């Protein structure tokens, strides 16, 4: 199975680099063993080694073989890197796709929950509106019922008054007829005017009777007054008694009906007031449900926002990863093809140049034959007594046993290493000491900067945490204050609604009292009028008496009663006006309170969202502070060690460098070293050593070194000494 397909089939199952390396190495080893090019090259090198030299063409073949080996190594490492990249791409895409699917599901859930919450909010709002309408309707019904009961009571009282007045008149008529005597002749009647008055009263009352009785009364009144009265008066008495019975029954029936209506009104009032109280409690519960649903809606909205952001981020990652991985795959395909072409070409050239025919032909050409260049070497190694003397001086250098670098120099001299190698090693160690000093200073500065940064960041983070805690407490107070305000407003709404119901009931009671007072005033007025009438009718017959004074007193009482009735009417009108105004104002207060509740609920949701944000930010800052403390704990051991030992390390470096400089000076001052330097310098002069001896800045030396004549050199360099 191909490397890429393996990773794509099983994301995250990247191959083991060690196992791959071992496998590739084994394959490469087997390929080299089986390669004819490798075998031929090895045979040629063996032959040339046996013959005592290496041809230039052989060096070229060796170079080509190294290039081929490096190309194959690039193929192997490139394949490993590409396989890891493919695995990384597959893992990244799989993770991004999983996050996209997960957050797509989260988005669907959040949107569904939001839709449910919005639907619930809508339903709850409708229920609140409906409940408010029902409360208003019940309140209106209570007001209407109270008004209707008041009107019915007034109508009943008026009818009762009329019936009672009619019954009184009937009794008076019957008394008159009884006084006359129903069995006497009309001519023998005691008083003709009284009989006439009785008949006229009967005629007046006949209007309230059924039509049959009315006709009977009219018929009697139309008969002449002559003749026997017994039959007529008896018939009149009978009719009047029927009238009395009919009116008495009507009065009793009307009274019973009014009592039943009052009982029904009382029950209706109690039912409506209980219903209004229950509906107010339901409105409060609905507002609580709206608040809870609003909080849920806010939470789900935040979840939806987070899920959408995470999904968008992973979609972008998936798109970018897909594009970059495709580009990487394309680039590797091109590079792999180039390496294969390169390896094929190198293999062909190596095979061509390593053949027996090529070997024979290269041996016939000077440029490709083996050549030997004798180079004169300069003795730069101490041996015997000279080495012992230098070692003795080196061992006397301070720190030769303390510092490992000095021990290494001594060991190199003991091993008879060339001067140039030993001096180069000393200079290398001195350079390393200088670099180490720079590193220590940089590390010390880094420790100082890191601690200062950590300290400042810790101070800033602590201050941020304190600020967040203060904001958190303030926001919690705001949440509590807003909740209290909502509860207070809801309590006010309930209180005002109850007050409206109580005031309406009180107004109904006041109306009943007013109707009773008006009736009493009317009854008193009628009695006073009747009394005054009787007194006035008898005032003249009584002559000079106290009737005039009595009439005056009764007249004053009548006027006062009429004034009281007028005052009662004015007060009732004012009370009705004040009641209507009170109900209107209270309804306005309820509407304002409900609007304030809605505003406070929005404000409460904002405070709760801010509270959640502060809690998350406080948690993040707490984690940051913990990381800073951990970071400082990690910094302290190494930095503290460096701070405590920086001076000691510096003094040791100075001592070690001085010891190395002294060792270097001892070597450079030795006669053997100076002679070696001189010989090396003379070697650079070549054939001109005799010419240049003691006058290297002279024109003759410089002309010799540049392989030209003195005249020719001076022509180009006229300012040179000797020109």
Image: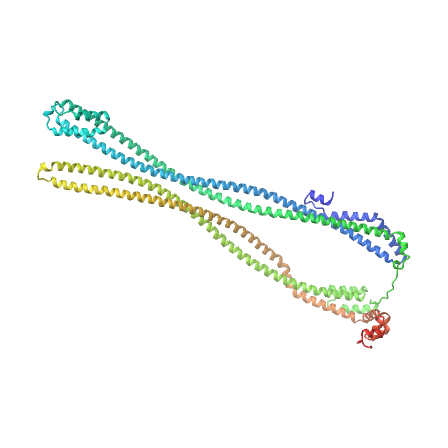
Judge from the rendering whether residue 304 lies leftward or rightward of residue 712; answer left or right.
left
Residue farthest bottom in this picture: 722
The residue lying at 14 percent from left, 29 percent from top is 196
The residue lying at 65 percent from left, 46 percent from top is 93
The residue lying at 44 percent from left, 39 percent from top is 127
Q: Is residue 632 above or below residue 297?
A: below
Judge from the rendering whether residue 638 lies leftward or rightward of residue 361; answer left or right.
left
The residue lying at 52 percent from left, 42 percent from top is 114
- Residue 107 placed where, x, y %? 57, 43
Q: How is the image coloured?
A: rainbow
- Residue 462 placed where, x, y %? 54, 57
Instruction: Locate the C terminus by quadrant.
Output: bottom right
Residue farthest left in this picture: 544
Front in this rendered view, residue 597 or 349: 349
Front in this rendered view, residue 338 or 356: 338
Is residue 271 something that shows in the picture?
yes
Q: Is residue 643 above or below residue 496?
A: below
Judge from the rendering whether residue 274 lies leftward or rightward of residue 77; answer left or right.
left
- Residue 418 placed where, x, y %? 81, 65
Is residue 396 something that shows in the picture?
no
- Residue 357 placed where, x, y %? 90, 52
Q: How many marks?
A: 0
Instruction: Locate the N terminus by quadrant.
Output: top right
Front in this rendered view, residue 234 or 99: 234
Give the quadrant of residue 548: top left
């Amino acid at each position: 199975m191909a490397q890429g397909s393996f990773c794509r089939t099983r994301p995250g199952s990247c191959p083991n680099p060690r196992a791959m390396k071992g496998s590739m190495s084994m394959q490469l080893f087997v390929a080299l063993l089986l390669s004819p090019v490798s075998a031929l090259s090895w045979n040629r090198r063996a032959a040339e080694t046996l013959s005592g030299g290496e041809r230039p063409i052989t060096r070229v073949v060796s170079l080509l073989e190294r290039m081929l080996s490096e190309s194959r190594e690039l193929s192997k490492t490139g394949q490993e890197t590409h396989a890891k990249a493919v695995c990384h791409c597959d893992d990244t895409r799989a993770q991004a796709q999983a996050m996209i699917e997960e957050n797509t599901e989260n988005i669907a859930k959040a949107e569904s929950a939001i839709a449910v919450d919005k639907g619930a909010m809508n339903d709850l709002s409708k229920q609140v509106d409906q409940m408010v309408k029902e409360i208003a309707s019940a309140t209106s019904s209570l007001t209407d019922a109270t008004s209707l009961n008041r009107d019915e009571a007034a109508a009943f009282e008026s009818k009762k008054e009329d019936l009672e007045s009619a019954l009184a008149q009937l009794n008076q008529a019957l008394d008159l007829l009884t006084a006359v005597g129903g069995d006497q002749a009309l001519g023998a009647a005691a008083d003709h005017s009284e009989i006439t008055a009785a008949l006229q009263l009967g005629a007046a009352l006949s209007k309230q009777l059924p039509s049959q009785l009315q006709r009977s009364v009219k018929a009697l009144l139309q008969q002449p007054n002559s003749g026997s009265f017994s039959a007529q008066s008896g018939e009149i008495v009978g009719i009047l008694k029927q009238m009395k019975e009919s009116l008495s029954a009507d009065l009793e029936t009307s009274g019973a009906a009014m009592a039943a209506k009052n009982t029904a009104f009382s029950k209706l009032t109690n039912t409506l007031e209980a219903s209004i109280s229950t509906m107010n409690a339901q409105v409060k519960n609905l507002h609580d449900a709206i608040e809870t649903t609003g909080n849920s809606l806010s939470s789900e909205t935040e979840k939806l926002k987070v899920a959408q952001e995470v999904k968008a981020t992973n979609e972008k990652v998936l798109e970018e990863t897909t594009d970059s991985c495709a580009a990487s795959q394309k680039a590797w395909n091109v590079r792999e093809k180039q390496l294969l072409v390169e390896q094929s070409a190198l293999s062909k050239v190596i095979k061509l140049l390593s053949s027996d025919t090529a070997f024979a032909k290269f041996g016939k050409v000077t440029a490709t034959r083996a050549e030997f260049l004798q180079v004169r070497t300069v003795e730069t190694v101490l041996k015997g007594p000279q080495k012992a003397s230098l070692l003795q001086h080196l061992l006397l250098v301070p720190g030769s046993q303390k510092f490992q670098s000095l021990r290494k120099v001594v060991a190199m001299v003991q091993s008879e290493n060339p001067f140039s190698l030993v001096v180069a090693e000393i200079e290398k160690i001195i350079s390393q000491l200088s670099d180490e000093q720079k590193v220590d200073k940089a590390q010390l500065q880094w420790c100082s900067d890191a601690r200062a940064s950590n300290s400042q960041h810790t101070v800033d983070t602590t201050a941020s945490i304190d600020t967040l805690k203060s904001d958190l407490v303030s926001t919690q107070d705001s949440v509590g204050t807003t909740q209290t305000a909502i509860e207070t407003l809801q309590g006010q709404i309930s209180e005002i609604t109850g007050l409206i119901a109580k005031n309406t009931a009180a107004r109904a009671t006041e109306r009943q009292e007013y109707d009773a007072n008006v009736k009493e005033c009317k009854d008193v007025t009628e009695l006073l009028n009747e009394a005054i009438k009787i007194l006035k009718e008898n005032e003249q017959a009584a002559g000079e008496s106290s009737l005039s004074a009595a009439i005056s007193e009764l007249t004053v009482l009548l006027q006062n009663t009429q004034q009281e009735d007028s005052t009662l009417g004015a007060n009732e009108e004012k009370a009705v006006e004040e009641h209507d105004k009170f109900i209107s104002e209270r309804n306005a207060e309820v509407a304002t309170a409900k609007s304030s509740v809605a505003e406070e609920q929005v404000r409460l949701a904002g405070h709760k969202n801010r509270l959640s944000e502060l809690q998350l930010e406080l948690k993040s800052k707490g984690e940051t502070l913990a990381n800073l403390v951990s970071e400082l704990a990690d910094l302290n051991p190494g930095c503290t060690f460096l701070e405590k030992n920086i001076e000691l390390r510096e003094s040791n470096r100075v001592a070690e460098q001085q010891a190395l400089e002294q060792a270097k000076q001892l070597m450079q001052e030795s006669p053997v070293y100076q002679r070696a330097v001189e010989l090396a310098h003379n070697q650079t002069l070549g054939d001109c050593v005799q010419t240049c001896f003691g006058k290297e800045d002279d024109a003759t030396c410089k002309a010799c070194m540049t392989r030209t004549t003195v005249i020719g050199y001076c022509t180009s360099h006229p300012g040179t000494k000797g020109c």
